[in-house]
Amino acid sequence: MKKTISGIRGIFGEDLNLKDILEFSNNFSSLIKSKKCVIGKDTRPSGQMVKDTASAALMKNGIDVFNLGTVPTPVVFREARKYGAGLVISSSHNPLEWNGMKFIIEGRGINEQELPQIINHQEILKTKIGTETDLVSSYIEDAKKIIGNIENKPEIIVDIGGGAAKGFAPELLMEVGCNVQILNENLSKCSRGPDPTSDNLSELVQATSKKDIGFAFDLDGDRLVVVRKGKKQSPDITLGLGVAKSLELGYKNFVLSIDTSVSVEKFINEKGGNVKRSKVGEANVIDLMLKNKAQAGGEGSSGGFILPEFNYCREGILTSGLIASMLGTTEFNEILKFMESYYQIRDKTKIDSEFHDKVIDEIKLKFSKEYSETISLDGIKGIIDEDSWVLIRKSNTEDIIRVSAESNDEEKCKRIVKDVIEMVNQSYEKIR
């Protein structure tokens, strides 16, 4: 079971059971000052059972529950702004046998100070029993106000991935003026896996060869991958396109995760904006956004664009509409051409967790001798030149060290990753 500020996740029926759901929901109740909580789930087979259990625990502790049913994660975040708290039953892009819980307070995910209150047992004072009410979200209407009308009626294919974006992403795109074709609407007949960033999206790639664009979502609708002219784009390009739209709207202050493409930062700087870098992870990006009153940003590795004025979470559905509104414009072609000249590789190597810190400390010494600049915000990042970098980070949940790199030369990027993985493995053999 994984317990982080990103939520609780585990294989349902093995390391995550209904007893755990009751405990975590009970503990979460102590953080809900408004005594109101919206709840929604994705399309996982265990979702209804987990949601019903969580709702019962919340009501037992005097929380009024507002049931959204099967909805994308961004919809729950949006409604949680109005009610004070939210709970998403999802394991995001993990395999179907997984499930989990994402906790929302005042429109944002929980932070490091709040996490212990959820994972450590809390005694809740007995109070009156809460109620449950079905809730219909105004998400599509709210998103339309941000996107506006799209006059050129682009041809778009939406790959739902059998997830909760059904009923929201296609409908929003049609409402703003797009012609939409849907793939993988239902989970039972889905041709791909739950994570569009790792799947080859072969059906969508083939279907978009003669369309304007294709969009692929994960199970809970917060991740978005773009397919353009029969080519799957890197998740960083999703973020870059969202950023380009933000710049068009006049926004200047951005936060990007440390592993996001340097091309996005360069584009922002060229347009007169400024960038701050956060640790990897949606919650870390949002935390720095709040501290710096950033207007937009996100996490390139997960295809996650974040627009704080609308939602404090990765916004796959809204972003699809924002990108659609740019199709055929100078801004769209400019950012796409600029970003496609950069190559990102994200890899990993197996290292026992007990040696993670020692390995990273040793690599830090090597990086400091080899590269002109090193950054230790999150793991260790070596700046090779103005267009190339490499980052190593330990996993908090697996016996692996992650290696990410980027360059405007594809072969150079491959060499960087190969050499650094070899360096990490040699350090591991030396110290263990």
Image (cartoon, rainbow, N blue to C red):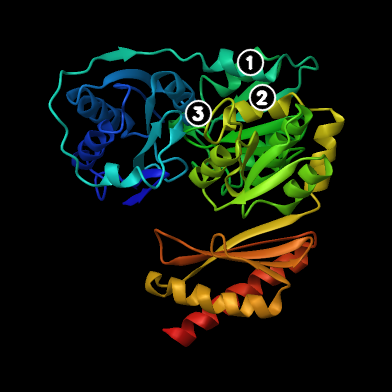
- Spatial separation of the CA atoms under disc 3 and disc 1: 14 Å
Residue 189: % across, % down:
47, 32
Residue type at mark 2 is Gly
- Marks 2 and 1: which is nearer the front? 1
Residue type at mark 1 is Lys
- Residue in the image at 14% along x and 30% along y: 125
Q: Nearer the viewer, residue 110 or 299?
A: 110
| Secondary structure under the numbered disc 1 in the rendered image | helix
Marker disc for residue 237: none
| Secondary structure under the numbered disc 3 in the rendered image | helix
Find disc 1 in the rendering and name its residue: 144
Looking at marks 2 and 1 on the same chain, the residue that comes earlier in the sequence is marked by: 1
Find disc 3 in the rendering and name its residue: 74
- Residue in the image at 43% along x and 44% along y: 6
- Spatial separation of the CA atoms under disc 2 and disc 1: 8 Å
Asked whether the residues under the numbered discs 2 and 1 touch, taking CB atoms below 8 Å apart as contact, a structural biologist would say: yes
Give the image quarter of residue 203.
top right
Q: Nearer the viewer, residue 411 or 267?
A: 267
Residue type at mark 3 is Pro
Q: Residue furthest right?
A: 330
